[in-house]
Amino acid sequence: MRQTFILFPILILLFSSCEGDDAMDPILIEEEFSIDLFFSEYVEGTSFNKALEIANFTGETIDLEASGYSIRKQSNGEGNWMGELILTGSILNEEVFVIGNESSTEPDLLNSAQQLKSGAPMDFNGNDAIGLFKDDVLIDVIGVLDEVEDYGKDVTLRRVTEITEPSAIFNSGEWEAFEVDDFSGLGSHSLQ
Ligand SMILES: [Ca+2]
Ligand SMILES: [Ca+2]
């Protein structure tokens, strides 16, 4: 019993010394970071000029393959997710990772890409929803599932700088459109 009486006032002292110290509050620190990776750019250009960009604002370097990230598409607004591309490499905090279509002949696109892939899922042409998956769970999407109409043909789409989180539901208002074959934004992304 004597030991309990001695410990109790020490614990009160420890707790009261932590209170009011905002720099130590883990919730405040966490709020400055994204919960996960998200798509930051979509390039649906002429020929094989297709690319996707993923941004990391989680506060940590992420090993894409070890963390289970992949990209799939739904072809022409029909059927299941297909064409899984397992992402490999790592992505530093506040950096982006670009996946390009390997058949592109555009140097600006190819030089900005960390990973290249020909065919699915990098053969999207405007009416194919593109999903970012983590451990087989959809965390972010470009385009509307089960919608056969074009949502993004002959266009470059960049996520607006106010968006800091992925979303499994597509919202076209989160994206700004640029001219076809505009590759100038590939390789970087900033938040507001
Ligand atoms: Ca298509
Ligand atoms: Ca970009």
Image: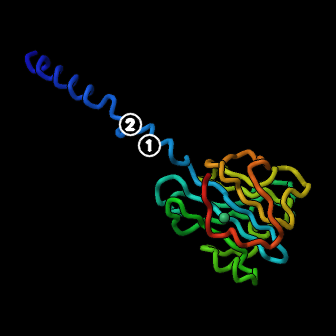
Q: Position of residue 39 (x, y in %)?
A: 67, 57
Query: Where residue 162 appears, x then y in whole percent?
Result: 66, 48
Give above or below for 43 relative to 26: below
What residue is at 16 percent from the left and 25 percent from the top?
10
Quadrant housing residue 155: bottom right
Q: Is mark 2 within 8 Å of ligand 2?
A: no
Say which amino acid is labelled 1: Ile
Real-space CA distance between mark 1 and mark 2, rounded to the nearest whole angstrom? 7 Å
For the residue labelled by badge 1, is the local secondary structure a helix, a strand or a loop? Answer: helix
Element carrying mark 2: loop
Query: Residue 21 at what x, y percent from top left?
Result: 33, 34
The residue under the point 79% across, 50% down is 172
x then y, percent, for residue 121: 74, 66
Instruction: Please name whichever residue, 189 or 46, is drawn nearer the observer in this view of the structure.
Output: 189
Residue plotted at (70% across, 46% down): 168
Image vertical order of residue 65 relative to residue 37, above or below: below
Quarter of the rendered image showing ligand 2: bottom right
CA neighbours of label 1 inside 10 A, class few (<14), some (14 to 19), many (20+): few
Q: Which residue is mark 2?
A: 25
Q: Which mark is residue 11?
A: none
Q: Which residue is mark 1?
A: 29
- Residue ranking furthest to the left: 2
